[in-house]
Amino acid sequence: MAGLIALTWRGDATLALIVAAALAGSMLVASLTEALVPLLWKTPLSDPALAFGVILTPFTDVCGILFLFGLSPLFLPALL
């Protein structure tokens, strides 16, 4: 959806691909970390969602920003 908005806004498919790839990478990191934490959590009588919710949300947000800022310079000549 965000890639489609970027495509309509700028009329450039490169920007849409950058945004779509950054969102896909962010969702991949979020799903992998949220799935692996309960498997790795060994403390009994404790809920891993409550223990790591505060840590994983900023982690996935930072990874999403890093994906966006990491992909942007690679495609900067095509955007200008």
Image (cartoon, grey):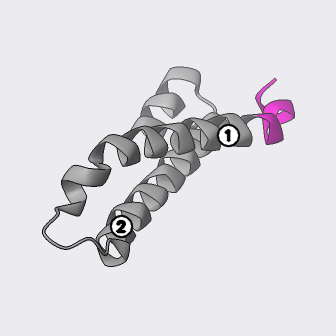
Q: Amino acid at mark 2?
A: Val
Q: Is residue 75 magenta?
A: yes
Label 2, residues with CA under 10 Å away: few <14, some 14-19, many ≥20: some
Q: Which of the pair 1/60 is nearer the observer? A: 60
Q: Nearer the viewer, residue 53 or 3?
A: 53
Residue drawn at (81%, 42%) of the image: 74
4 on left or right of 49: right
Q: Are marks 2 and 1 in contact (CB under 8 Å)?
A: no
- Residue 75 lies, in percent from the top left, at 79, 39
Which residue has dot 1 on it? Answer: 14
Q: Residue pushed farthest right?
A: 77
Q: Position of residue 69 (x, y in %)?
A: 68, 34
- Towards the viewer: 33 or 19: 33
Disc number at residue 80? none
**Residue 31 visible at all:** yes
On-image quarter of the C terminus: top right
Q: Residues within 10 Å of mark 1 (few under 14, many from 20)?
A: some
Residue 61 belongs to the span the image colors magenta: no
Q: Residue furthest front?
A: 44
Residue sitting at 38 percent across and 72 percent down? 36
Tell me where the magenta segment starts and ends, as one range.
Answer: 73-80
- Which residue is under mark 2? 37
